[in-house]
């Protein structure tokens, strides 16, 4: 039984076959998943999907690369959605220096807004990080001054030192398909160091298809099994043990009963 903690099930890649995608996920042992919003309208759709499908939950937020496109009322929409049925997290949020879509100071402002909203409702927040590890850590350290953090380092790509500090701050570490890539030996070594109780798996579908289905597009929740298998091998445990642990961790973090 697996829990895919980060999907973009709302996206157009799944509009023609969403029922089939979810059926294949169930057949692969993926009992639960979170549909994560990147914009206010995407977040609304994620909440709708959570109401429509058993085992589907929602995270609501405005991803840093989409902030510049946000309308004047979009943040108010996220604040309202935070209390909607089926919402288990805030995000995705975070910072991104790879793409120059949103001025960095505005990204930081919205990252802070998401963290505060999550703390207000006692929900975890979902952190996107790309080419900005130091910036992310500075903001997490600052947020920690208000209390132990509760969130997910989504599709983690940092090193073991960064992961250890994130865990100390209260965060969970989630691994996606990049863990399985041949060039990702350093990331696999990092994954071996994460405490059992802070470990999660995800697809980030429709992106980042894992080996051995890396050529398949779009990625889909059923493929989280491949990432979990790789993670189990790295940690020298059985897939069953890894699945049970990561599902237990996700259910606890999201306030669900497994």
Image (spheres, rainbow, N blue to C red):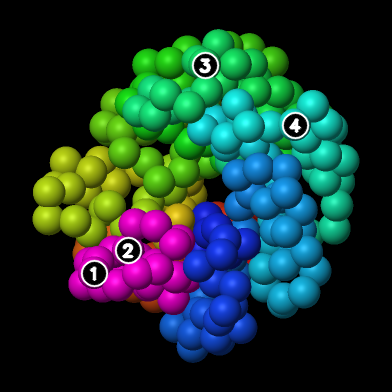
Q: Find the magenta span and give its range.
A: 205-229
For marks 1 and 3, the one nearer the N-term is 3
Look at the numbered discs 1 and 2 and tell me whether their residues touch, using CB distance below 8 Å: yes
Which SS class for mark 3? Answer: loop
Q: Is residue 53 left or right of residue 63?
A: right
Q: Residue at x 31, y 38 (%)?
A: 157
Was residue 207 drawn as part of the magenta stretch in this picture?
Answer: yes
Which SS class for mark 1? Answer: loop
**Residue behind mark 1:** 215
For marks 4 and 3, the one nearer the N-term is 4
Which SS class for mark 2? Answer: loop
**Crowd rating for badge 3 (residues with CA inside 10 Å; few <14, some 14–19, many 20+):** some
Nearer mark to the viewer, of 2 and 4: 4
**Crowd rating for badge 1 (residues with CA inside 10 Å; few <14, some 14–19, many 20+):** few
Q: Quadrant of the C terminus?
A: bottom right
Q: Is residue 196 above or below residue 157?
A: below
For marks 2 and 4, the one nearer the N-term is 4
Q: Is residue 226 visible?
A: yes
């Amino acid at each position: 039984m697996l829990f895919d903690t980060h999907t973009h099930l709302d996206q157009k890649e799944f509009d023609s076959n969403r029922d089939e995608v979810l059926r294949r996920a169930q057949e692969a042992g993926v009992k639960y998943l979170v549909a994560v919003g990147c914009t206010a309208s995407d977040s609304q759709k994620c909440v709708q999907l959570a109401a429509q499908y058993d085992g589907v939950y929602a995270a609501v937020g405005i991803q840093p690369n989409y902030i510049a496109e946000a309308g004047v009322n979009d943040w108010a929409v996220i604040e309202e959605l935070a209390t909607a049925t089926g919402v288990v997290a805030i995000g995705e949020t975070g910072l991104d220096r790879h793409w120059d879509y949103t001025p960095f100071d505005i990204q930081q402002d919205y990252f802070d807004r998401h963290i505060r909203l999550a703390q207000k409702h006692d929900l975890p927040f979902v952190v996107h990080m790309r080419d900005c590890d130091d910036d992310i850590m500075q903001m997490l350290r600052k947020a920690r001054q208000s209390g132990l953090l509760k969130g997910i380092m989504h599709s983690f790509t940092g090193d073991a030192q960064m992961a250890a500090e994130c865990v100390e701050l209260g965060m969970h570490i989630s691994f996606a398909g990049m863990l399985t890539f041949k060039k990702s030996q350093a990331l696999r070594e990092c994954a071996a160091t994460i405490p059992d109780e802070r470990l999660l798996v995800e697809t980030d579908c429709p992106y980042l298809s894992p080996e051995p289905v890396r050529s398949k597009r779009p990625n889909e929740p059923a493929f989280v099994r491949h990432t979990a298998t790789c993670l189990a091998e790295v940690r020298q445990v059985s897939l069953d043990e890894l699945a049970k642990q990561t599902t237990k961790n996700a259910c606890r973090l999201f306030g669900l009963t497994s």
